């Protein structure tokens, strides 16, 4: 535990200038840092040294299970369409449903893997069953850490396709 003590703090400072005077004193004065083990050192604020700790990891601690992500995506999609009419996915509301479903899937995956360094990207598309669609994507990919999974659900005359990309950030 560190305790900061200012050695040149004035006690009588006018109220309107109290903050500015305290800032000037802290910037100009040297500070004493005391530790619990009674050792101390003095630092001057004139020559600040920035210290960085390395926080990068080249590989994740735990691998993410594709079956868990598939189950999360499948349950979110089934909850969205359960109890709805067959014409629920009309052309007017498809963009709103895609946005809401992708946000819901992303939040559920983040809740499951809250302490991981994976970037989660979810893409949802709704197409008519008789239509033809081709989806493609390109990105920088690391085969050992990054992965993707796709879930497809048929509802009425439409097909909902959700794809989740999980990219590891070091």
Image (cartoon, rainbow, N blue to C red):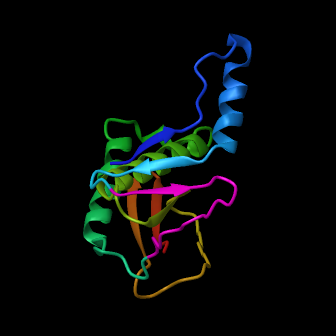
- Give the image location of residue 131, x and y in percent: 58, 64
Residue 98 visible? The answer is: no
When asked about the image quadrant of residue 82, the answer is top left
- Give the image location of residue 80, x and y in percent: 38, 42
94 lies above or below 138: above
**Which residue corresponds to the image point at 28% horizontal and 73% vertical from the top-left?**
62
Q: Tell me: 166 left or right of 83.
A: right
120 lies above or below 91: below
**Which residue corresponds to the image point at 60% horizontal and 76% vertical from the top-left?**
136
- Give the image location of residue 161, x and y in percent: 47, 61
- Give the image location of residue 66, x and y in percent: 30, 72
Q: Is residue 77 or residue 127 the one in the foreground?
A: 77
Residue range (magenta): 39-56
Taking the view exactly as shown, the residue that stands out farthest to the top is: 15
When asked about the image quadrant of residue 117, the answer is bottom left
Inspect the magenta stretch and tell me whether residue 50 lies in it.
yes
Q: Tell me: 27 left or right of 156.
A: right
Q: Is residue 126 or residue 56 the one in the foreground?
A: 56
106 lies above or below 3: below
Q: Main secondary structure of the magenta part?
A: loop
- How many discs mark residues in the rendered view? 0
When asked about the image quadrant of residue 153, the answer is bottom left
Q: Is residue 82 or residue 15 the one in the foreground?
A: 15
Residue 70 visible? The answer is: yes
Taking the view exactly as shown, the residue that stands out farthest to the bottom is: 143
**Which residue corresponds to the image point at 46% horizontal and 61% vertical from the top-left?**
162
Inspect the magenta stretch and tell me whether residue 51 lies in it.
yes
């Amino acid at each position: 535990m560190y305790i900061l003590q200012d050695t040149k703090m004035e006690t009588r400072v006018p109220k309107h200038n109290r903050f500015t005077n305290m800032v000037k004193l802290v910037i100009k004065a040297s500070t004493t840092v005391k530790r619990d083990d009674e050792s101390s050192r003095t630092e001057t604020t004139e020559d600040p040294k920035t210290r960085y700790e390395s926080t990068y990891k080249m590989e994740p601690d735990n691998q993410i299970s594709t079956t868990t992500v598939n189950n999360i995506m499948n349950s979110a999609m089934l909850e969205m369409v359960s109890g709805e009419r067959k014409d629920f996915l009309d052309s007017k509301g498809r963009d709103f449903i895609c946005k809401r479903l992708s946000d819901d899937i992303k939040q559920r995956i983040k809740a499951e893997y809250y302490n991981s360094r994976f970037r989660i990207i979810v893409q949802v598309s709704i197409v008519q069953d008789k239509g033809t669609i081709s989806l493609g994507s390109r990105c920088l990919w690391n085969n050992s850490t990054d992965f993707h999974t796709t879930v497809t659900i048929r509802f009425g005359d439409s097909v909902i396709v959700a794809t989740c990309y999980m990219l590891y950030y070091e």
